[in-house]
Image (cartoon, rainbow, N blue to C red):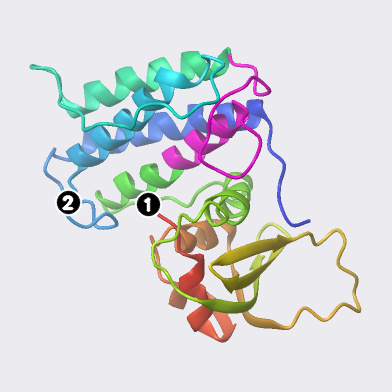
Amino acid sequence: MSRLHGTKDFWIGALRAEGPAFAAALAEAPPETPVLSCPGWTVTDLAVHLGGVYQWVHTFVGTGETSAPARREEIELPPGTSAAQFWQHSYDQLIALLDGLDPEAPAWNWAPQPKKAGFWIRRMAHETAVHRWDAQLAIAAGDPIETKLATDGVSEVLDTMLPAGRRTASGQWRGVVHLGATDADQEWYLRLRGEGVALLDTDTILDHDDHHARVRVAGTASDLVLALWGRISFDTLAVTGDATLLAGLRTG
């Protein structure tokens, strides 16, 4: 299959696992510890950023509105509140909201897909997982993202982030990229055409179809999604073919 169709319970379960792991890393790291995977950030910056994303989502998801909300603003911590406390409060609020949310309810999103609340349950699960990895890396850890979640994370980059134009670089790439998760029996074919992208449905691709894949990448699902998010280099994975196309897959 070209993508994994998660469910609300799956993504909420991921949030419930990744959130405490993020909090544990925050508790272990001094506030000014650099986050190596987010140059220029400390763990305080990371916690404030993620808590701010949670609070912003909380302002509009569940209202039933599909028009764009106000832009997310910079967060200033209340006096006497630590970044970890701010993050924890924001996380608890988000979990309470999403837990009672109908994923089919109307809700704005920035992607070229249906405006439904389920988008944000999925998005927050993956946002938290990647930043949990960032926080753990700051304390010389960085556990892999769970395989099923990472597999859906790869799909999210390919079916949501890139079609929405959320690339870290601009360019004119042309060709088919083949990604394969070695621990999940999952593969993806993505066609790049200039600024455009198209995720090919492997359920409808026949064995005799010629995909003309110009580059193939193999690795664990966790390594694939971390490479797509720019956390690790594609050079650490098994790459054959024209690696220059991989710059067109980076999101952020």
Residue pointed to by mark 2: 34
Residue 242, quarter of the rendered image: bottom right
- Residue toward you, 158 or 11: 158
Residue pointed to by mark 1: 142
| Percent position of residue 97, x then y | 49, 15
Q: Look at label 2 and name its amino acid.
A: Pro
Q: Residue at x 69, y 57 (%)?
A: 184
Vertical placement of 228 versus 213: above or below? Answer: above
Q: Main secondary structure of the magenta part?
A: loop
Q: Nearer the viewer, mark 2 or mark 1?
A: 2
Query: Residue 115: within the magenta?
Result: yes
Q: Earlier in the sequence, mark 2 or mark 1?
A: 2
Q: Look at label 1 and name its amino acid.
A: Gly
Vertical placement of 37 versus 175: above or below? Answer: above
- The quadrant of the picture occupied by the N terminus is bottom right
| Percent position of residue 6, x then y | 68, 37
The magenta span reads: 101-128
Q: Residue at x 27, y 36 (%)?
A: 49
Residue 156 in the figure: left or right of residue 200 = left
- Residue toward you, 43 or 117: 117
- Total numbered labels placed on residues in the image: 2
Q: Residue at x 53, y 67 (%)?
A: 195
Q: Residues within 10 Å of mark 1 (few under 14, many from 20)?
A: some
Residue 179 in the figure: left or right of residue 108 = right
